Amino acid sequence: MPKPKKEEKIPMVRSNKIIYFMMGIITLFLVFLTIKVMNLEKKIASGATGTTGAQQESSISVKNLKKYAKEMKLNAGKFNKCLDSGEKKSLVEKDATYGTSVGIQGTPGFFINGKFLGGAFPFSAFKEIIDKELDGTSSTKCINYTDSNLQQQCDETGTDPSKAFKPVSKQLDVSNTQVIGPKDAKVQLVEFSDFECPFCIRVYSTVKQILKDYNGQVRLYYKQFPLTQIHQNAQKAAEASLCAADQGKFWEFHDKLFTLDQAAQ
């Protein structure tokens, strides 16, 4: 009777080497992928667009503020001295303190003949309030406003901090404030704003449209309200605008700072 054949053992040494080799390749790939992801996160966090260098300088840094003043043909020596000395700091802080006292919590904040409207509302919301002021149908009742944004945000009591439209007017002190528009305008528009605030930048075009569409009927007052806790360049930008005002160029400087994003596109 023939002897049964012994079962042949499959050699494992070569197979193990292949497995170890493949595991090494996978490990190296995972390490490489992890490094790439970490670098990408750093780029996103720092706002970098194609380099891994230092964080990009703000368009309203002190250096750039001085550059804009020079481009606008201001007296550079006078402007730089004004900005570097901090002589306008107290005026900016005075505006901000006053804003807080009348209920401003963030920017932009507006008062339209004393009616508060807080935020970058669309033109339609401003238009309804202004039209009512002009045609004599101004109201303190929410039900009398048809714009959906105004209805949703209306607070007749003036005590709800979650609501951004308060139709009951407040008396405002606008002395020593930058102003544009005729003194006898029927609508007084007071704006509290921050040159580094993205919502203020967004609503800038709306304010320009108001001044254009209601030419001669609206007088605009601009008050400083830099959110220094989150906007590190806003304070100096506000001071710079007042330094420009000393040379009769507040509104030109104001427009320059609020259109920097458009110029960069």
Image (spheres, grey):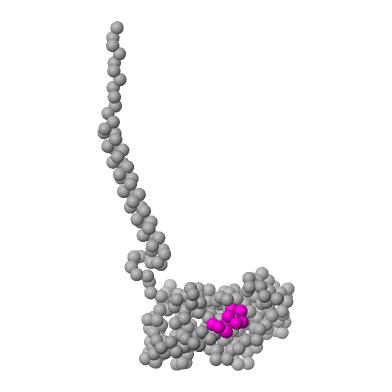
Residue 97 lies left or right of residue 5; in this view the side is: right
Nearer-the-camera pick, 91 or 33: 91
Residue ID at (40%, 66%): 46
Residue ID at (32%, 42%): 23
Nearer-the-camera pick, 169 or 248: 169
Residue 250, position in %: x, y?
A: 48, 88
Chief SS of the magenta region = helix
Quarter of the view holding residue 215: bottom right
Quarter of the view holding residue 50: bottom left
Residue 82, position in %: x, y?
A: 42, 89
Q: Is residue 1 above or below residue 261?
A: above
Residue 146 lies left or right of residue 239; in this view the side is: right
Residue 220, position in %: x, y?
A: 57, 86
Question: Which residue is the extreme one toward the top?
Answer: 1
Residue ID at (60%, 76%): 118
The answer to whether residue 95 shows anywhere in this view is yes
The answer to whether residue 262 shows anywhere in this view is no
Q: Which quarter of the rendering shows the N terminus? A: top left
Residue 7 lies in the magenta-colored region? no
Q: Is residue 224 above or below residue 176?
A: above
Q: Which quarter of the rendering shows the C terminus? A: bottom left
Quarter of the view holding residue 187: bottom right
Query: Which residue range is magenta in the image?
Result: 96-104
Badge count: 0
Residue 169, position in %: x, y?
A: 67, 82
Residue 101 lies in the magenta-colored region? yes
